[in-house]
Amino acid sequence: MDYSLRELECFVAVAEELSFTRAARRLHLAQPPLSRHIRVLEEKIGAPLFERSQKGVALTAAGAVFQEETRGILPQLLRAGEAVRRQVQGETARLRLGFVSAVLSEKLVETFRRFRQLHPQVQVMLHDMPPAEQWSGMMQGTLDGGFVGLMPDEKDRPAGMQHVPWREEPLVAFVPSGHRLGTGGSNSSRKPVSIKEFAQEPFVAVSSEAAPVFATLLRELCSAAGFRLRIVLESPRAQAVAVMVAAGSGVAFLPESLAHVLGGSVEVVRLKEAPVITHVFAHPSGGSTSPAMKAFLELLSPE
């Protein structure tokens, strides 16, 4: 059956707004043409799609079925039009990149900006996702690469992936303001603290499902210090963990760069035995690397 794009736009607007007046305003269209498009669509389908009464507008049973069966068609058509527009304007490639927002730095943002300046034909699509979701996206082909956080152990690395180290920073302890192991607000006022000092502390942490490599690192660090990590709360997001520390829910071992998230709401304590952690950018290595990815890798210099 031959439906016009305009008819579908009108149907979706009325179905979502349940008001011809609001739908017309949303589409920047006068109400009589909107009603005419809906009437033509109903004639093509052979059934009324909306019930109109003094109480308002509601979907009929046929309208509800039509809404369900056509869900996603309009966005797909609009994406197709946008893809053609980009092609006509010279945007002939795209990079779909995942990132853990905790690893974003000024230099990395500048890298994205610089890449856009040098390669305006490439559309960069960024997705804030936990590491586990990034790995899944790359293996399923919905992501071209990702800033996944720490380098996995060789035995745990997904097959067919290339890893590019791009940043190093120390692991530190985050404690609530005023904590007994805190620095009193000055990061230079106290010497590094042994990890053993945290043996009796309740921890908040990034969940092992979201960041399995980081979770393993923390368990091994605490085990080497002679105690078992006691986690009272978890979150898939490192920023949320930092917020829980600020709220007094516990302490956390996190990358130092996260200190900028909460400013003075938490205290950062340097650790004696903590390693310098290496963040990596990962991308599938099977087959040929696209020109867009090659150009991005050339620009992604280690910090």
Image: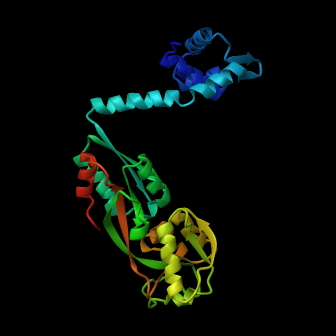
**Residue 250 locus on image (x, y percent):** 61, 76
Q: Can you say which quadrant of the picture contains the C terminus? A: bottom left
Q: How is the image coloured?
A: rainbow
The picture quadrant where one finds residue 105 is bottom left
**Is residue 180 toward the left or the right of residue 286 in the image?**
right
Residue 182: x and y, percent? 53, 85
Would residue 183 be seen by someone viewing this image from the given angle? Answer: no
Q: Residue at x 63, y 20 (%)?
A: 20
Does 150 appear above or below 143?
below
> Left or right: 292 with respect to 9?
left
Residue plotted at (34% across, 72% down): 168
Q: Is residue 95 visible?
A: yes
Q: 2 or 233, which is in the foreground?
A: 2
Left or right placement of residue 135 versus residue 200 in this view = left
Horizontal and vertical percent for residue 133? 49, 55
**Left or right: where does residue 57 sit relative to residue 197?**
right
User: Toward the viewer: 150 or 17?
Assistant: 150
Q: Is residue 178 above or below residue 99?
A: below
Total numbered labels: 0
Place of residue 297 in the rendered image (x, y in percent of width and height, measured from the top left)? 26, 56
The residue located at (44%, 48%) in the rendering is 140
The quarter holding residue 284 reads bottom left
